[in-house]
Image (cartoon, grey):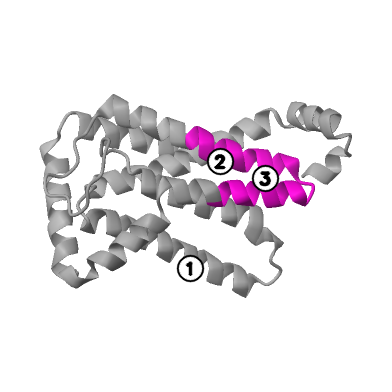
Amino acid sequence: MIKKSEFDRQQLIGWWGLLAVIAILVKSQSNVLFSFDQDGLVTVHQFLQPSQISLFKWLALSGSPVVTTVAIIGIAGWLLHRNQPILSLIAVTTIVGGDILTLFIKEAIQRPRPAFELVRESGFSFPSGHVFGATILVILIWQLLIPKIGRIQFKLFFLLLLIYWVGLVAISRIYLQVHFPSDVIGGFVLAQAWWQTVKMGYLRWEQQILTTVNQLTRSNPKQLR
């Protein structure tokens, strides 16, 4: 189960602080950030071919908020079936609350998307909802499912595979020119910050949550972890 750690508190502050810095730079239309984003867009297109557009559309689709939300709800359902309602609740809370938070930040920053989109997207650009959802999905798989795998070799293999997939989703959003590089970085940072928030919130109210779920399910609290 999730362990308490002073390092978690440091991460919580660090990730939210980093997100705040990026958001301020985006909102103030920083020249430094503008140069970084333009250089990033050019660099990605230098190494990729136009024939790969269909591939990157599919990669983007695999990390779309709809797909990642459905996947996480599926994970939550499986955890509930395995008599782990607390973990199921954490999974649902993380993705639903995170998606709402992402939309709120988008509306607060109101950053327009890049001018030359290769696919049509609605809404604002910062942060990337695709990268946020993909990162949250990977975090939940790593935290809630991977620990059930016994061998460390398999754990490392799945972790590298999941990280590789998130990287491809991020690159696809830049390649399709629906996001700036700082948008995908913002989506990744927001996912880390939000997970730490949910994690610390659970740790703070752990006993109350366990008691409530125990009353609702008439289960032994030790079985819920």
Within 10 Å of the Cα at label 1, are there few (<14), some (14-19), or many (20+) other Cα atoms? few
Q: Is residue 62 above or below residue 153?
A: above
Badge 3 is on which residue? 2
Looking at the image, can residue 28 be seen? Answer: yes
The image position of residue 189, as x and y in percent, is 39, 43
Secondary element under disc 3, as helix, strand or loop, is loop
Badge 1 is on which residue? 161
Q: Which residues are magenta?
A: 71-98
Residue 8 badge: 2
Give the quadrant of residue 25.
top left
Secondary element under disc 1, as helix, strand or loop, is helix
Q: Is residue 47 above or below residue 100?
A: below
Within 10 Å of the Cα at label 3, are there few (<14), some (14-19), or many (20+) other Cα atoms? few
Quadrant location, the C terminus? top right
Tell me the kind of residue under disc 3: Ile
Tell me the kind of residue under disc 1: Leu
The image position of residue 129, as x and y in percent, is 37, 43
The CA span between labels 1 and 2 is: 25 Å
Secondary element under disc 2, as helix, strand or loop, is helix
**Nearest to viewer (mark 1 / mark 2):** 1
Q: Is residue 32 left or right of residue 208?
A: left
Q: Residue at x 48, y 36 (%)?
A: 98
The image position of residue 183, as x and y in percent, is 28, 44
Tell me the kind of residue under disc 2: Asp
Q: Is residue 223 above or below residue 213?
A: below
The image position of residue 22, as x and y in percent, is 28, 37
